[in-house]
Image (spheres, rainbow, N blue to C red):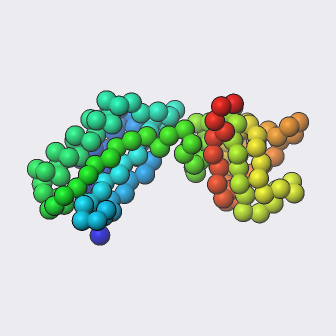
Amino acid sequence: MFEDVKKRIEDEIAEDLKFYNLEIFDFSIHFRNRTAAISLLLDHEEGGINLDECMHFNKKISNLIEKEGLLGGEYTVEVSSPGLDRPLQTQKDFVRVRGKGVKVHLKRMIEGKLEHDGVVQEVGQDHVVVAIAKKTIIIPFGVIQKAVLIIGE
């Protein structure tokens, strides 16, 4: 329903994303009652987005919507970071947390378990190597149901 609006917004902010070295982590537009809610999660490759960056993109998107009348009614724009507890989904996500602790939930057992806590050692094209206690295990990306950074380690 909002694919054209999303594409127009993405086109408008593309140069700014490059300038700030940011990438879109998640982007959605949906209705909350009768108000269109635009939610944009941005992040740097190494993680973290500051308040000025959030404000810049919020203002840029709001100005575009007003100027072009993209939504034709009430709307909200929320620009934020996915946060430290964001799920690790891609090869790039695992590269970003190399050397850090992760909790990995699996679709099928590896080494007799469906869940492993360990430190990301290596990241390949189709797998991640995690050090657990005194050994390492290879976990194919296709077997990962959910993975998150262990905060506070």
- Which residue sits at x=14%, y=62%? 72
Residue 136, image x and y in percent?
A: 83, 41
Pick the residue in front: 58 or 126. Answer: 58
Residue 30, image x and y in percent?
A: 33, 62
Residue 109, image x and y in percent?
A: 81, 60
- Which residue sits at x=22%, y=41%? 60
| Quadrant of the drawing holding the C terminus | top right
Pick the residue in front: 30 or 26. Answer: 30
> Does 105 sit left or right of 112 as displayed?
left
> Does 92 sit left or right of 138 as displayed?
left
Asked if 33 appears above or below 153 in the picture, the reply is below
Q: Quadrant of residue 146?
A: bottom right
Residue 98 at least partly seen: no
Residue 144 at least partly seen: yes
- Which residue sits at x=86%, y=37%? 133
| Quadrant of the drawing holding the N terminus | bottom left
> Does 101 sit left or right of 68 as displayed?
right
